Image (cartoon, rainbow, N blue to C red):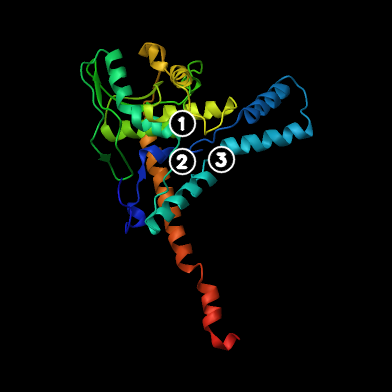
């Protein structure tokens, strides 16, 4: 991780894994604004009525006018409220040299089994050797360390590995379902590496052995047993088998989603990082002057 301490606002970059936080609702400045389904529907409805010689209601006309105005007004680039909150959290982390850490069973599983997942997926692709990437990449806007750099059929591919906690986390029945945070992480890695394709690969792996006892303890108590009663070996084995997803072949517990960067995406990232830096400058200014009025009042004896 890059140390942000003492960096100027104009130098601030964002981690690929966090990029999605500032890309919510992002559009290039000056582009045509995207309409939601309701806005598109009202335009189609009113225009059809007018074509058929029917008069729309006053409410429909008002909604139509608002939708057309939005559609025809060039988009003004801005950060979403959520993006601003993320920038504030980044600012606090830099200012106070503080990094919030959190750990859950899901994150511990991902960290512990990621390398094994890479090995198993590589074998599925027929690759004789694979190792977790150790190379750090950065440009003037984003930085990060991809999980894996892969060459397959003469194509350079940068996959990011996700190890969901539960089988439903594979999202096998959702076509290209991808969280925004993962989508932009994949695109950013491809941009940084210059590779041909980006992939998000979900792999269902067993929990690490260190988590199995804790899981068994939860089920043991739910079954009405006391923590003071030792868990039986049979019970521990049953829980272990319930989480033994690797009894299935890798092909049945993997979901691959291509996540290629689009032609306008680099410009969009540059724009949003620019907005992030402007927000950072504003936060610097507010923090510097937040107590000015009260200090002036308190230290000015003539005001008492």
Q: Quadrant of residue 303?
A: bottom right
Crowdedness near tag 3: few (<14), some (14–19) or many (≥20) residues, C-alpha within 10 Å: few
**Residue designated by label 2:** 21
Report whether 242 appears left or right of 8: right
Secondary-structure class at tag 2:
helix
The x, y position of residue 302, in whole percent, is: 57, 88
The answer to whether marks 1 and 3 mark residues whose Cβ atoms lie closer than 8 Å is no
Crowdedness near tag 2: few (<14), some (14–19) or many (≥20) residues, C-alpha within 10 Å: some
**Residue designated by label 3:** 73
Precedes in sequence: disc 1 or disc 3:
3
**Residue designated by label 1:** 214
Residue 132 appears in the picture as rendered: yes
Q: Residue 175: which numbered mark, if any?
A: none
The answer to whether marks 1 and 2 mark residues whose Cβ atoms lie closer than 8 Å is no
Q: Residue at x 41, y 40 (%)?
A: 18
Q: Residue at x 44, y 42 (%)?
A: 102
How far is mark 1 from mark 3, CA to CA?
56 Å
Q: Quadrant of residue 164?
A: top left
Secondary-structure class at tag 3:
loop
Quadrant containing the N terminus in the rendered view: top left
Q: Nearer the viewer, residue 304 or 286?
A: 304
Which of pointers 3 and 2 indicates the residue nearer the eye? 2
């Amino acid at each position: 991780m890059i140390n942000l301490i003492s960096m100027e606002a104009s130098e601030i970059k964002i981690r690929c894994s966090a990029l999605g936080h500032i890309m919510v609702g992002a559009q290039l400045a000056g582009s045509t604004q995207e309409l939601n389904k309701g806005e598109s529907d009202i335009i189609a409805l009113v225009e059809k009525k007018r074509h058929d010689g029917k008069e729309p209601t006053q409410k429909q006309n008002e909604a139509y006018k608002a939708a057309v105005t939005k559609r025809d007004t060039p988009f003004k680039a801005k950060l979403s409220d959520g993006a601003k909150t993320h920038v504030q959290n980044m600012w606090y982390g830099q200012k106070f040299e503080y990094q919030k850490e959190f750990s859950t069973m899901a994150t511990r599983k991902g960290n512990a089994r990621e390398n094994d997942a890479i090995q198993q997926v590589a074998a599925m692709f027929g690759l004789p050797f694979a190792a977790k990437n150790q190379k750090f990449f950065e440009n003037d806007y984003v930085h990060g360390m991809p999980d894996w750099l892969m060459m397959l059929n003469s194509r350079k591919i940068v996959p990011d590995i996700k190890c969901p906690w539960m089988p439903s986390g594979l999202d096998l029945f959702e076509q290209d379902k991808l969280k925004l945070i993962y989508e932009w992480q994949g695109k950013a890695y491809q941009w940084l590496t210059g590779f041909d394709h980006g992939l998000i690969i979900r792999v269902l792996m067993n929990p690490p052995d260190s988590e199995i006892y804790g899981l068994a303890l939860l089920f043991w108590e739910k079954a009405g047993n006391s923590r003071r009663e030792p868990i039986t070996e049979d019970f521990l084995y049953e829980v272990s088998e319930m989480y033994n997803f690797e009894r299935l072949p890798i092909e049945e517990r993997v979901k691959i989603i291509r996540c290629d960067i689009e032609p306008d995406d680099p410009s969009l990232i540059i724009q949003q990082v620019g907005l992030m830096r402007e927000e950072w400058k504003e936060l610097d200014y507010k923090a510097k002057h937040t107590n000015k009025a009260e200090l002036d009042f308190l230290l000015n004896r003539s005001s008492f």
